[in-house]
Structure formats: structure tokens, C-alpha cells
Image (spheres, rainbow, N blue to C red):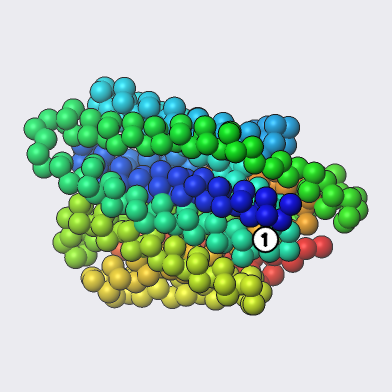
């Protein structure tokens, strides 16, 4: 059984890579669509609003669906729905309409929500006693996707922008890249279906029987509720920083968008390196202590960026990626600890909380429009303060 679980974990690395790769392309779409449709900061941040808004709308629904159909089936359906969303980019680009682009993005995001809802608890239930370190290790491949995604976007979406003579041609530059991604996702769905991964719902039921805490609702677990709020602020901060990094580099260091997309790979690459290192460290040091340290480092770096500006700000903001690394998997594993049969439902609640990625970037964009772009980074900095509270106090199970 342990060997079979290890094989399943290895297969799930492809899922996390795909989620990271697709999600980070939003950071490429924001400056790209801002130019095409002549958007302000707030309007361009609606890319993240539509993408992460899907988590709020569909997260709870998918959590309940997965509790009935099982995690492997959820993964297969997630790949198919995400591929369909990618395919919709073709007609959306043909119309050169920003609202239609946002609609296609919502469908794509719904597929990613299903993958997220199935993938995270799947890993924790496959790794009893090693939830935080296993999820952090698998999430490192998510960060590999977020590292390679900007390089892909820079080469196939942003680099040739200057060659286009019309807005329609610029919009259509996303068609072939997203069709290629759709093909890979459909292939992954077929592979996962043929491999017949183990259904671990029985593991959750056994944990519930062992604990016998008498709770009948996920909302009776305070560490889950506080953890879901921490996920809201974490995803909001991470996505908001990533969303405005390219635009910030242009403003403070006069770096063009295509080159900035390559630099942003260091932001997500830092998260990848941090997750590989963090996975090893958390096998020896308590996860909440690692989370606390990383929160305060993120706060310090954000403060440095705001106070000093210029190239120092650029380097400080990119460095935050390294300390973001362990936050999501650690918060998730602490928030869902000992939930047993409620794990899939709890995953749905946490996916709803990922709506932070939809709400925080527009708030930062609004502040940037009314103050300055660099000063607006105070918004993600405040998010890290709450995460530090969860790491110090809120994670404790009762």
C-alpha cells in the first residue's frame, strides 16, 4: 500500500505542475491585455478577479462532488474542464473583447479549482503523519510550473507584441499557446484515468472514527476556519505581488514587459527552491514555526521595497517568492489536520478562500491608481500579518 501511495504522489506532481503553469500565465496576461485594451491598474486586475472568483463560486460545490465521486475521478474531470477553458481562448481572442476573455478565463479557472480541491487533500490523505512535508514537496512542482510559465509567456505571448499592427492581432497571440496547453491537459486526463490511482476516502473515514470528536460540521473546527482565512490572505498577497511585479519593474527600473516576464520567473523560482528546502526542514522543525519565520521575512522585504523603491524594491519583491514557498501547503495541512471524513469538504472551503486572489489585487490596483504603485504594496504586507497570527495561535486544534 505504501509503495502504491508513493506512486500516486509521483503522478500528482504533474497535476501541481499544470496548476502552477496555468495560474502564473495570468501575470503575463495582465500587462499584455492592459496594453491591448488600454486598461488602468484596477481594470487589468480583473483578470485575477475572474480567475480566483471561480474559487469562491465553485470551491464548495466541487468539495461535495469529490466526496461522492472520489479524488482520482475529480483529478480527471479537473484536467478536462481546464482544457476546455484553454480551448475557449481561441474564440475569445478572435473577438478581441476583454469581457469575453474574462469569461473564458473563468471557465479555465473552474477546472483549476477542481484540480486544487481534489489534489491537496489527496496528497495529505496519502501521507498520514507527514502531511506538511509531503504537500510542500509536491507543491514544489507547482512552483516549477510557476517558474517556467513566465518564460513560456515571455517567448510566445509578450515577445512579439511589437510586431503586431492591430489590436486584433495582439489579442490572437494567445490562441496557439493556450491550444497547446489544452492538448497537454487532455493527455494528462487520459494518463491519470488509465493509471487507476487509489481512492483514499476510506482513510478519511478511519481518521474520523479514531478521533471520535463528535463534530458534525466543518465549521466546528476553529483551526480550519482560521486556516481558511489565512489561505484567503496568503493567496491574495502572493497573487497581488505577482500581478504587479512586471508593471513595478517597468516603473521603478524601466524594464520592458517581455524582460520583466523573465525576471518574474525568479519570484516563482524562489518559491520552488524554498519548497524543496522547506520540505526537508519541516521533517525536523515544526511546520508552524517555519511558517512564522517566513511570514516575518515577507513583511520585512515588503517594507524594504516600500521604503527604498528603485532596484532595491524590485529585488526585495522578487525575494518574497522564496519565503512564500511553504505558506500554502503548510497552512493547508495545519488547517485540515485530523478532519478525517470532512477533509474533502474542508478542501472545498479552503478553495473558496482562495478568492483572496480575486479580491486583493483589485484593492491593491485601486490603491495604486490613487497613491502610487510602490506604496500599494502595503496591502499584501498587511495580509502577511494575519498569516503570522495563524502560525502563532490560530493553527492549534481544539
> Which is nearer the eye, 55 or 46?
55
Mark 1, residues whose alpha carbon is within 10 Å: few (<14), some, or many (≥20)?
A: many
Is residue 80 rendered to the left or right of residue 207? left
Name the spot of residue 305 as percent of width and height, x first. 33, 71
Question: For the C terminus, which image quadrant?
Answer: bottom right
Name the spot of residue 102 as percent of width and height, x first. 38, 32
Q: In this view, does 371 lie above or below 152?
A: below
> Which is nearer the eye, 197 or 169?
197
Q: Is residue 195 above or below residue 333?
A: above
In terms of secondary structure, where does tag 1 sit? helix
Residue beneath the point at 49% across and 59% down? 140
Q: Is residue 301 visible?
A: yes
Residue beneath the point at 41% across and 43% down? 22
Q: Is residue 369 visible?
A: no
Is residue 334 rendered to the left or right of residue 322? right
Q: Is residue 276 above or below residue 116?
A: below
Q: Quadrant of residue 72?
A: top right
Name the spot of residue 112 as percent of width and height, x first. 50, 39
Mark 1 sits on what residue?
A: 131
> Which is nearer the eye, 381 or 66?
66
Q: Is residue 392 above or below residue 332?
A: below
Name the spot of residue 263 as percent of width and height, x first. 27, 61
Residue beneath the point at 32% across and 59% down? 265
Residue beneath the point at 64% across and 77% down? 284
Q: In which quarter of the image is residue 173?
A: top left
The mark total stands at 1
Amino acid at each position: 500500500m505504501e509503495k502504491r501511495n508513493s506512486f500516486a504522489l509521483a503522478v500528482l506532481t504533474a497535476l501541481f505542475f499544470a496548476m502552477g503553469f496555468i495560474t502564473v500565465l495570468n501575470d503575463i496576461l495582465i500587462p499584455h491585455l492592459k496594453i491591448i485594451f488600454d486598461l488602468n491598474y484596477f481594470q487589468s486586475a480583473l483578470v485575477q478577479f475572474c480567475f480566483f472568483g471561480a474559487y469562491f463560486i465553485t470551491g464548495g460545490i466541487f468539495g461535495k462532488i469529490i466526496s461522492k465521486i472520489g479524488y482520482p475521478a475529480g483529478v480527471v474531470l479537473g484536467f478536462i474542464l481546464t482544457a476546455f477553458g484553454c480551448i475557449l481562448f481561441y474564440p475569445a481572442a478572435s473577438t478581441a473583447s476583454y469581457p469575453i476573455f474574462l469569461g473564458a478565463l473563468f471557465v479555465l479557472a473552474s477546472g483549476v479549482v477542481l484540480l486544487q480541491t481534489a489534489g491537496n487533500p489527496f496528497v495529505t490523505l496519502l501521507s498520514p503523519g507527514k502531511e506538511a512535508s509531503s504537500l510542500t514537496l509536491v507543491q514544489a512542482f507547482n512552483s516549477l510550473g510557476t517558474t517556467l510559465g513566465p518564460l513560456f509567456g515571455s517567448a510566445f505571448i509578450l515577445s512579439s507584441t511589437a510586431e503586431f499592427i492591430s489590436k486584433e492581432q495582439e489579442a490572437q497571440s494567445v490562441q496557439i499557446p493556450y491550444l497547446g496547453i489544452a492538448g497537454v491537459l487532455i493527455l494528462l486526463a487520459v494518463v491519470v484515468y488509465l493509471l487507476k490511482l487509489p481512492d483514499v476516502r476510506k482513510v478519511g473515514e478511519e481518521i474520523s472514527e479514531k478521533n471520535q470528536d463528535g463534530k458534525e460540521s466543518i465549521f466546528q473546527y476553529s483551526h480550519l476556519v482560521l486556516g481558511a482565512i489565512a489561505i484567503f490572505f496568503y493567496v491574495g498577497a502572493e497573487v497581488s505581488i505577482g500581478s504587479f511585479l512586471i508593471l513595478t519593474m517597468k516603473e521603478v527600473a524601466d524594464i520592458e514587459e517581455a524582460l520583466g516576464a523573465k525576471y518574474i520567473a525568479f519570484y516563482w523560482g524562489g518559491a520552488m527552491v524554498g519548497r524543496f528546502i522547506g520540505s526537508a526542514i519541516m521533517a525536523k522543525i515544526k511546520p508552524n514555526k517555519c511558517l512564522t519565520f517566513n511570514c516575518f521575512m515577507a513583511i520585512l522585504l515588503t517594507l524594504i521595497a516600500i521604503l527604498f523603491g528603485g532596484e532595491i524594491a524590485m529585488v526585495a519583491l522578487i525575494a518574497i517568492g522564496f519565503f512564500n514557498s511553504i505558506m500554502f501547503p503548510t497552512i493547508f495541512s495545519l488547517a485540515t489536520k485530523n478532519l478525517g471524513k470532512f477533509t474533502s469538504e474542508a478542501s472545498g472551503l479552503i478553495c473558496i478562500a482562495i478568492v483572496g486572489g480575486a479580491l486583493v489585487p483589485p484593492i491593491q490596483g485601486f490603491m495604486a491608481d490613487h497613491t502610487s504603485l510602490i506604496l500599494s504594496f502595503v496591502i499584501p504586507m498587511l495580509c502577511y500579518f494575519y498569516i503570522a497570527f495563524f502560525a502563532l495561535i490560530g493553527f492549534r486544534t481544539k
